[in-house]
């Protein structure tokens, strides 16, 4: 599993999220440890973990299913990719609590479904994301 900065630099799995560059006043809402703790046995199914961006946006967490197929996608680049996006440091604790309480259990279910899905489901790209707006996490938005 590889963690990458927004510039595409590889950090490997041993570097903590707090060691990556962020804009002043921003933080990562979750760490690799948070994800591993809540996702448990489903966490190893995450093929790629990314900490993306330098400035906060509405999206705080996204997950993608990348099918193994041709069309310019390397056959080894498939499966589940999880992206954590930065938040305002002042909001981090509140967002982290909301993510751990409501979103990560949903994410765990999404990952479990992806792993056991039919070949028809796995043949198509899927994406799901959670936004932080108006001081709450909005319901996930999902596309296929």
Image (cartoon, helix red, strand yellow):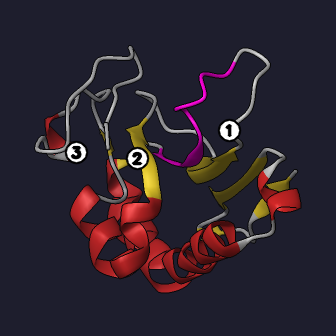
Q: Residue at 76% across / 23% down in the picture?
A: 70
* Element at label 2: strand
Q: Residue 9 carries which label?
A: none
Residue for badge 3: 17
Q: Position of residue 134 (x, y in %)?
A: 67, 63
Cα distance in 3D space between marks 1 and 3: 28 Å
Give the CA separation, mark 3 to mark 2: 15 Å
Q: Which of the two marks, 3 or 2, is nearer to us in this view?
A: 3
* 34 left or right of 141 in image: left
Mark 2 or 1, which is nearer the eye?
A: 1
| In the foreground, 61 or 112 | 112
Q: Residues within 10 Å of mark 2 (few under 14, many from 20)?
A: some
Which of disc 3 and disc 1 is earlier in sequence? Answer: 3
Residue at numbered disc 1: 68
> First in sequence: mark 3 or mark 2?
3
**In this figure, which residue is indicated by the disc labeled 2?**
88
Q: Give the extent of the magenta segment.
A: 73-84
Q: Is residue 48 magenta?
A: no
Q: Can you say whether 48 is above or below 103 in the image?
A: above
- Tell me the quarter of the picture where residue 119 sits: bottom right
88 relative to 123 in the view: left or right: left
Q: Is residue 10 found left or right of 126 in the rendered image?
A: left
Instruction: Bin the neighbour count of mark 3 within 10 Å (Cα to Cα): few under 14, some 14-19, many 20 and up.
Output: many
* SS class, disc 1: loop
Q: Is residue 81 magenta?
A: yes
């Amino acid at each position: 599993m590889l963690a990458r900065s927004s510039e595409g630099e590889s950090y490997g799995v041993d570097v903590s999220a707090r060691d990556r560059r962020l804009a002043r006043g921003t933080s990562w809402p979750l760490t690799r440890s948070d994800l591993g703790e809540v996702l448990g046995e489903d966490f190893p199914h995450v093929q790629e973990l990314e900490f993306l961006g330098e400035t906060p946006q509405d999206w705080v967490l996204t997950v993608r299913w990348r099918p193994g197929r041709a069309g310019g996608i390397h056959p080894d680049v498939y499966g589940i990719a999880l992206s954590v996006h930065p938040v305002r440091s002042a909001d981090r604790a509140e967002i982290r609590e909301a993510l751990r309480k409501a979103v990560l259990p949903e994410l765990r279910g999404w990952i479990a479904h992806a792993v056991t899905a039919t070949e028809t489901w796995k043949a198509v790209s899927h994406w799901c994301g959670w936004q932080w707006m108006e001081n709450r996490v909005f319901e996930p938005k999902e596309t296929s």
